[in-house]
């Protein structure tokens, strides 16, 4: 004869089941809490590493910018080592440090034609004596192209101080740029004074990216001219990159013609 469960045994069974469920819930809560702690630790470690990397990047960027500024100041204050050696052992008298544009010989008919041409004054800011010959040759090519393609005579004046920049005259700021990041104290001050300015940036090698200008130069354009090597520093116009830059530059300069 089968025994029937008593009320007491039923109560004990329910109590045991309840204890089991409570125990399981406690374990689940413990697992959730453990996962939350693990995730929090991971987040904390990730945030610390990210902040550490961010601070390292800031330090590296400051160091690079300081190096560029020091190099720029050294280039503007002292001639290159090669220039010093050549000037020391050369028997020729020292050449003038001023860049001079040599006006080509013109016939009477050419002079009459030039009288009817449009004329535009521009300033060319130069603070790197190492590139004097390069800049002189480049200006000759630009003025010749402007005359031939736009019937525009460019009368340029070399300036070396930011105080010489003029509100009414376009300034072409010349600088060698070895990286795609542009930095210059002089250019920054000219831009802050709201002077009209574009950039002639000399570059070397197979550059993979264009120079990036900061928002400070939002009204300026950068025109990149590539030199053949770092010894001669010639801007060869048979290089398609240089020809394209000269066409774009002259088209932009014409906009300032009154």
Image (spheres, helix red, strand yellow):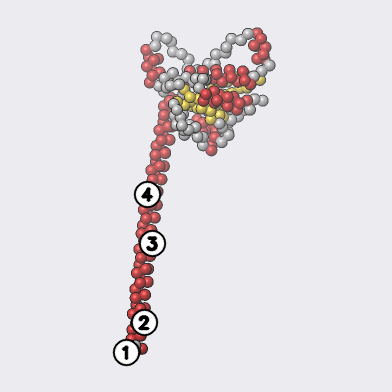
Q: Taking 36 as reference, is 252 above or below it? A: above
Q: Which mark is residue 49?
A: 4
Say which label, 4 or 1, has the lower sequence index. 1
Q: CA distance from mark 2 to mark 3?
A: 33 Å
Q: CA distance from mark 3 to mark 4?
A: 20 Å
Q: Nearer the viewer, residue 59 or 249?
A: 249
Q: CA distance from mark 4 to mark 1?
A: 70 Å
Residue 94 percent across, percent down from the top left: 44, 13
Residue 253 percent across, percent down from the top left: 60, 26
SS for dot 3:
helix
Q: Which residue is mark 1?
A: 2
Residue 69 percent across, percent down from the top left: 43, 32
Residue shown at 41% from the left, 31% from the top: 70
SS for dot 1:
loop
Whether tag 2 and tag 1 are in contact, CB under 8 A, the answer is: no
Say which label, 2 or 3, has the lower sequence index. 2
Say which label, 3 or 4, has the lower sequence index. 3
Say which label, 2 or 1, has the lower sequence index. 1
Quarter of the image for the C terminus: give it.
Answer: top right
**Of all residues shown, which one is farthest toward the bottom?**
1
Say which label, 4 or 2, has the lower sequence index. 2
Q: Which residue is mark 2?
A: 14
Quarter of the image for the N terminus: give it.
Answer: bottom left
Say which label, 1 or 3, has the lower sequence index. 1
Q: Is residue 198 left or right of residue 84?
A: right
Q: Which residue is mark 3?
A: 36
């Amino acid at each position: 004869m089968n025994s029937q469960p008593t009320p007491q045994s039923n109560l004990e069974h329910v109590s045991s089941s309840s204890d089991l469920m409570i125990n399981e819930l406690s374990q689940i809560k413990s697992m959730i809490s453990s996962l939350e702690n693990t995730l929090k630790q991971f987040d904390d470690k990730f945030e610390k590493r990210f902040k550490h990397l961010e601070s390292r990047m800031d330090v590296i960027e400051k160091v690079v910018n300081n190096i560029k500024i020091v190099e720029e100041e050294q280039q503007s204050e002292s001639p290159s080592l090669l220039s010093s050696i050549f000037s020391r052992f050369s028997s020729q008298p020292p050449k003038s440090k001023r860049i001079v544009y040599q006006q080509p010989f013109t016939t009477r008919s050419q002079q009459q034609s030039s009288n009817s041409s449009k004329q535009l004054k521009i300033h060319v800011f130069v603070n790197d004596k190492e590139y004097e010959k390069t800049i002189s040759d480049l200006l000759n090519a630009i003025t010749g192209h402007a005359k031939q393609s736009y019937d525009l005579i460019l009368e340029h004046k070399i300036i070396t101080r930011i105080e010489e920049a003029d509100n009414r005259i376009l300034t072409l700021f010349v600088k060698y740029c070895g990286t795609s990041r542009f930095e210059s104290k002089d250019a920054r001050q000219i831009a802050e004074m709201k002077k009209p300015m574009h950039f002639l940036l000399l570059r070397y090698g197979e550059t993979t990216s264009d120079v990036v200008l900061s928002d400070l130069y939002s009204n300026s354009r950068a025109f990149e001219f590539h030199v053949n090597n770092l010894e001669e520093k010639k801007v060869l116009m048979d290089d398609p990159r240089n020809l394209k830059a000269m066409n774009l530059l002259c088209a932009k300069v014409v906009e300032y013609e009154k």
